[in-house]
């Protein structure tokens, strides 16, 4: 678990929620009308334990986080509280209400802290609404942390393998041959550095390739075609999961190739989420897709992110992989919220009955007073004739 980024072990957690109830009593009437005004702030009680020869150093760092005394933490940020990683409910923004440090004579080099947090829910600020297009554009902000962490981890993996006696030709082939093939297709200029000497440069090359593929798309009038093209191009990176080269690989090379595949999966998932963000931003400006199509875009991006999270945890473990998985989870949530924000801004989709023979342009003029919305009706009803018959039922927005 963590609070304000400081890790600690938790052996007990207890959550308490109390409802805010108002009782309305009346003269000469038994009982009362009870009105539920909502829930009070959630109280979280945790028991943290620190043990080992260095327990005091780690405990002091944690107490500094509880007190808001971390030098890297601004005073205003400390006053607002901090993020607590709850063992069951995940990330929660909390204030520290109290804590108590306990030592016992029987347990050497160990201390326990009883801490009570109060969940903090900030009131909605004035002028605090966020446009749907802003939510879509925010997706790209979460990709850099995940890809940077993936690059650092592949660098550390290769660094550990660097041994004069190790046979690393297979790993070099697995890293470079697919990369050069994709480079020729995408036309992106890479660093040209040896992958075993500079593995982090290789990781940056992967990110540059993914971003280069996105830069080739305009995301204009035919969003679904651009979206399908992006998915097809990013599928080329799957070769890193089964790279060419001399087989069988040594155990060290196999571990390196697994780290390579995880790095590539993180980058392609981030690239697909960024592409989804571009699609959603374009859709927020000019509606062209149905709610079902928007859901499909979001679900595809989130599925790729889930695959990346599973692969990272398989290679690095849950704790070491957290630097990559946490930004990925935040990015998946951002994709979901952006798609939802765009869908809910649309009028409800309903079924309407055509009252007379005509076409979509006449229907748009009759229903909306705007004949230019005819392409919208045509799109909502799929590829079909623009002419309609009396009594036919078609899809249309409520207004």
Image: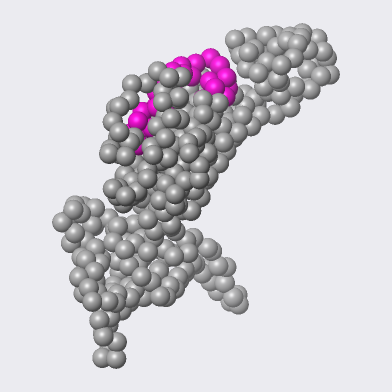
Check the image and tell me how it is coloured.
one colour
Task: Identify whether 191 is placed above or below 161.
Answer: above
Q: Which residue is nearer to you in this view: 165 or 44?
A: 165
Quadrant of the image occupied by residue 197 = top left
Residue sitting at the far front: 165
Q: Position of residue 313 (x, y in %)?
A: 46, 53
**Which residue appears at 70% of the width and 9% of the height?**
362
Q: Position of residue 388 (x, y in %)?
A: 78, 12
Examine the structure image and report whether residue 215 is included in the region drawn in magenta.
Answer: yes
Q: Quadrant of the C terminus?
A: top right
Task: Please state the total of marks drawn on the protein image.
Answer: 0
Examine the structure image and report whether residue 345 is included in the region drawn in magenta.
Answer: no
Task: Identify whether 51 is placed above or below 62.
Answer: below
**Which residue appears at 54% of the width and 64% of the height?**
35
Q: Which residues are magenta?
A: 203-230
Q: Position of residue 97 (x, y in %)?
A: 30, 69
Q: Quadrant of the N terminus?
A: bottom left
Residue sitting at the far right: 391
**Which residue appears at 49% of the width and 48% of the height?**
311
Q: Which residue is nearer to you in this view: 255 or 353?
A: 255
Name the dominant secondary structure of the magenta segment: helix
Q: Position of residue 62 (x, y in %)?
A: 25, 67
Would residue 152 be found to the left or right of residue 360 on screen?
A: left
**Which residue appears at 20% of the width and 54% of the height?**
73
Would residue 344 be found to the left or right of residue 142 on screen?
A: right
């Amino acid at each position: 678990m963590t609070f304000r980024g400081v890790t600690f072990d938790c052996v007990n957690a207890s959550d308490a929620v109390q409802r805010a109830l108002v009782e309305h009593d009346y003269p000469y009437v038994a009982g009362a009308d009870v009105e539920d005004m909502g829930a009070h702030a959630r109280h979280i009680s945790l028991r943290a334990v620190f043990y080992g020869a260095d327990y005091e150093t780690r405990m002091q760092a944690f107490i500094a986080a509880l007190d808001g005394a971390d030098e890297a933490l601004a005073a205003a940020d400390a006053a607002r509280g901090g993020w607590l990683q709850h063992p069951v409910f995940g990330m929660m923004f909390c204030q520290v209400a109290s804590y108590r440090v306990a030592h016992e004579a029987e347990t050497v080099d160990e201390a326990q802290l009883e801490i009570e947090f109060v969940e903090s829910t900030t009131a909605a600020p004035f002028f605090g609404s966020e446009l749907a297009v802003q939510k879509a554009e925010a997706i790209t902000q979460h990709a850099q942390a995940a890809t940077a962490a993936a690059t650092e981890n592949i660098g550390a993996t290769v660094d550990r393998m660097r041994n004069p006696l190790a046979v690393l030709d297979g790993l070099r082939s697995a890293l470079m041959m697919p990369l050069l093939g994709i480079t020729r297709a995408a036309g992106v200029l890479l660093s040209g550095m040896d992958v075993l000497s500079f593995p982090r440069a290789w990781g940056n090359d992967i990110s540059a390739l993914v971003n280069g593929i996105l830069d080739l798309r305009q995301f204009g009038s035919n969003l679904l075609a651009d979206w399908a093209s992006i998915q097809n191009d990013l599928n080329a990176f799957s070769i890193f999961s089964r790279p060419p080269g001399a087989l069988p690989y040594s155990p060290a090379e196999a571990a390196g190739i697994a780290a390579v595949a995880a790095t590539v999966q993180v980058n392609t998932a981030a690239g697909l989420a960024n592409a989804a963000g571009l699609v959603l931003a374009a859709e927020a400006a000019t509606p062209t897709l149905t709610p079902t199509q928007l859901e499909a875009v979001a679900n595809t991006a989130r599925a790729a992110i889930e695959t990346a999270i599973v692969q990272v945890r398989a290679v690095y473990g849950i704790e070491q992989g957290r630097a990559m998985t946490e930004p990925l989870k935040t990015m998946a949530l951002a994709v979901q919220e952006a798609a939802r924000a765009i869908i809910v801004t649309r009028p409800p989709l309903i079924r309407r009955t055509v009252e007379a023979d005509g076409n979509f342009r006449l229907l748009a003029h009759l229903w909306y007073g705007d004949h230019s919305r005819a392409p919208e009706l045509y799109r909502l009803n799929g590829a079909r004739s623009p002419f309609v018959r009396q009594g036919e039922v078609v899809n249309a927005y409520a207004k």
